[in-house]
Amino acid sequence: MKPASIAAQGLGWVDDQTRAVVPPIHTSTTFLRDPDNQYRSGRIYARDHNPTFDQAEAVLTALEGGHASLLFASGMAAATAVFQALAPGDRVLAPKVMYWSLRNWLANFATQWGLRVQFIDMSNPDHVRSAVQSDKIDLVWIETPANPLWTITDIAATSEIAHASGAIVAVDSTVATPVLTRPFELGADIVMHSATKYLNGHSDVIAGTLTAREDTPLWQRIRSIRAQIGGVLGPFEAWLLTRGMRTLFPRVRAACASAQSIAERLAQHPLIDEVLYPGLQSFPGHVLAAQQMHGGFGGMLSIRVRGSKNGSLKGEEAAIATAAKVQLWKRATSLGGVESLIEHRASVEGAGTPVPGDLLRLSVGLEETDDLVADLEQALAQAHS
């Protein structure tokens, strides 16, 4: 089956006992031993053996074309498990522009048990090459498109450079999703998703996932970390995630088409200085994005709002005022849901953020594109009135 059919049918699984096409939710925390004290079912305790995980993990593994997947309690739990599986003294390369919470965690927590973390411009393979030549690198972390400037990293080139030096490559593919990019085909070793976003798609589940290209000692350590630390998903959330992934392809395709239209229509708007979207030919990473993203450029874009000509209204003030005036867009954190969200990222990230103060991040949902554009236009006009 093609990936869209795999997702829509959840691999076609049917409950063996009831023949139901929708899987049951298993809430049991423990499982019965055999009379001879064995666990031939393969399940011991629900912390990492809950049957409700099986379908979601299998669907994601099939979509990514990997060896196995693991569900976690959040995107942060999934991402940090990768770094926790490293050893003290290991060196990590990460992008300067990336999900802010994970960047803070790497800078302020990962270093406490001895990881050495270097932030570089990951969009330039020469910077990666220079870093791996100057010191031994153990893990290269890629996020592409990178939140919230949507910079593009060449997964294939970066993986080739990293592997030549003996490093492992992990890709945060939350924004691209398996609909648009399959990082394993480009050389990655691990793929991470904040499943809260597009995989679930309904803003009602906090979840994270990891998928491995093959079984390795690092993957076994990650699996052990999930079980021992306990950052696992609840059964109801796992069931909701399975349900959400069944509509992944039509949701992402619709969001991509709408985001592309919005970006093109706002690119020449007199009250916007710049539109950041990989689907625009003017975007610095457009050519590379077209090579490794197939079927669209994602549902995320950012706009940089222009201040007044006389300087009485700065760009940051205009951006905040614009967000205050929207009616259809929702002022909220997160992305990838069916409702469109708008957020002033610099305010959220605080001191040290690389995000310009005049930037608004937009997560395009499933509303009518004309309505979304009209709402932004009226908000921009009111902010400058």
Image: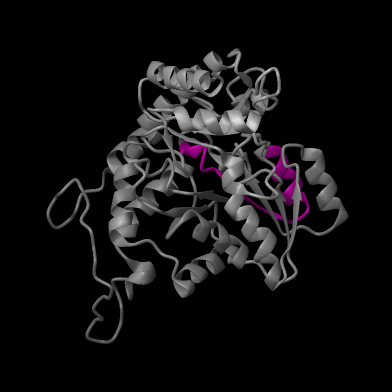
Q: What residue appears at the point 87 percent right and 54 percent down from the top-left corner?
A: 134
Q: Is residue 306 visible?
A: yes
Q: Is residue 86 above or below residue 155?
A: below
Q: Position of residue 243 (x, y in %)?
A: 29, 45
Q: Position of residue 293 (x, y in %)?
A: 56, 30
Q: What residue appears at the point 82 percent right and 50 percent down from the top-left corner?
A: 131
Q: Position of residue 362 (x, y in %)?
A: 50, 32
**Is 39 displayed left or right of 358 in the figure?**
left
Quadrant of the rendered image containing residue 82: bottom right
Q: Is residue 48 magenta?
A: no
Q: Quadrant of the C terminus?
A: top right
Magenta span of residues: 156-178
Q: How many marks?
A: 0
Q: Is residue 358 above or below residue 224?
A: above
Q: Residue furthest left?
A: 18
Q: What residue appears at the point 48 percent right and 49 percent down from the top-left corner?
A: 194
Q: What residue appears at the point 37 percent right and 70 percent down from the top-left corner?
A: 47
Q: Is residue 166 magenta?
A: yes
Q: Quadrant of the N terminus?
A: top left
Q: Is residue 189 visible?
A: no
